[in-house]
Image (cartoon, rainbow, N blue to C red):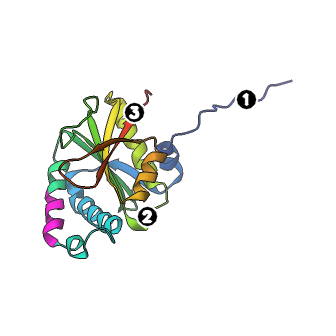
Amino acid sequence: MSQAPTRNKRRPSTIEAGMRTSPTQIRKAVPGDLDSVAGLHTRARSDYYRGFVEEAELADPAGAAARRDYWARILGSADHTVFLAHKADRPLGFAMIGACAHPDPDPRVSSEMHLYVDPGSFRQGIGTDLHSACVQAWRAASVTKARLWVQDFNQRAQAFYRSQGWAPDGHHRTDSAGLLGYILDIPAA
């Protein structure tokens, strides 16, 4: 009597599963992705902040130009990595990890994260896949604790981050009213 073959019971990570079965792909962004990243940031920010921030501020071309300049610096920086989620060359979201932009109140934090998903692509697993890419990169770099800041009114983002293991730590950014600190303890691989 022959035995049934044993199967590998390890389930693929979200990234592995998404790369095999989904047309959505994640790759490292390059400086040539600047328009995609800056445009996504502006669209996502406008959606997240609508109703909490004045429309004039959301539509301000000077603000959009400043964000574009910021992302140009980040995409050219060796201290940051930007992951871009896309489907058929259409950008769907991005995440940035790297050196903290402001001194962190927790000396154990060595990296921060920003994550944005195009409003038309919410609830499709894109944020989860981007987050998984960040965690994998942190593990590879031996980062054990990371920071993100989220607006106090952005309940959707706070719920998402909590679902990914982030926890509020009671810190607030002093240079921007309403930014709450979240911490992620990155488990070893």
In the image, what residue occupies the spot 28% across and 33% down?
109
Q: What element carries label 2?
A: helix
Q: Does the magenta stretch include residue 64?
A: yes
Q: Is residue 4 left or right of residue 184?
A: right
Read off the residue under disc 2.
121
Give the mark nearest the N terminus, 2 or 3.
2
Q: Which residue in the rendered view is the most extreme toward the right?
A: 1
The residue to which callout 1 is attached is 5
| Residue type at numbered disc 2 | Ser
Instruction: Judge from the rendering whether residue 68 lies leftward or rightward of residue 28; answer left or right.
Output: left
Could you give the CA–CA distance between mark 2 and mark 3, rounded to whole angstroms? 27 Å
Of residue 83 and residue 32, the one placed in the foreground of this image is 83
Amino acid carrying mark 3 in the image: Asp
In the image shown, does 3 or 29 lie closer to the viewer? 29
- Residue 116 magenta-drawn? no
Helix, strand or loop at label 1? It is: loop
Above or below 150: residue 79? above
Viewer-proximal residue, 50 or 152? 152
Mark 3 — residue? 185
Labels 2 & 3 near each other (Cβ < 8 A): no
Residue at image position (42%, 58%) is: 155
Marks 3 and 1, how far apart at CA:
38 Å
Neighbourhood count class around disc 1 (C-alpha, 10 Å): few under 14, some 14–19, many 20 upward: few
Q: Residue 111: x, y in percent?
A: 27, 37
Q: What stretch is highlighted in magenta?
A: 61-69
What residue is at 49 percent from the left and 59 percent from the top?
A: 124
